[in-house]
Amino acid sequence: MQQHRKQQLKEAKMLHATVNAVDLYLSELLEDIRASSDAIKKLDTSENKFENTLSQAIKKTGKNA
């Protein structure tokens, strides 16, 4: 009986360590996803600004032509 309890305790500790490792991995993955999302938003904003600037330049060029 004592041996069975020791085995259960060992397995519980291993499971706990595994859960902690997975939690850490997922936290880091979520952080990376958030950083990527922020970078994509900045890129979209820059792209929109470029398109607006280009559109205005084309309109001005058309008026001056």
Image (tube, rainbow, N blue to C red):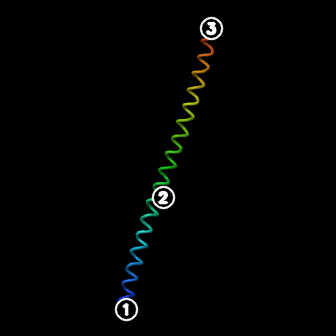
Secondary-structure class at tag 2: helix
Work out whether 43 lies above or below 64.
Answer: below
Instruction: Look at the image and tell me in which quarter the N terminus lies.
Output: bottom left
Secondary-structure class at tag 1: helix
Q: Are marks 3 and 2 in contact (CB under 8 Å)?
A: no
Which residue is under mark 2? 27
Nearer to us in this view, 31 or 62: 62
- Figure quadrant of residue 56: top right
Secondary-structure class at tag 3: helix
Which residue is under mark 3? 64
Work out whether 40 lies above or below 22.
Answer: above
Earlier residue among tags 3 and 2: 2
- The residue depicted at 42 percent of the width and 65 percent of the height is 21
Earlier residue among tags 2 and 1: 1
User: Which residue appears farthest toward the right when viewing the image?
Assistant: 63
- Label 3 CA crowd tier, 10 Å (few <14, some 14–19, many 20+): few
Q: Report how far apart the C-alphas of labels 1 and 3 lie in the structure.
A: 93 Å
- The residue depicted at 50 percent of the width and 47 percent of the height is 35
Q: Report how far apart the C-alphas of labels 3 and 2 lie in the structure.
A: 56 Å
Residue 57, image x and y in percent?
A: 59, 17
Which residue is under mark 1? 2
- Label 2 CA crowd tier, 10 Å (few <14, some 14–19, many 20+): few
User: Which residue appears farthest toward the bottom when viewing the image?
Assistant: 1
- The residue depicted at 37 percent of the width and 80 percent of the height is 10
The disc labelled 1 sits on which kind of residue? Gln
Q: Is residue 17 left or right of residue 63?
A: left
The disc labelled 2 sits on which kind of residue? Ser
The disc labelled 3 sits on which kind of residue? Asn
Instruction: Look at the image and tell me in which quarter the C terminus lies.
Output: top right
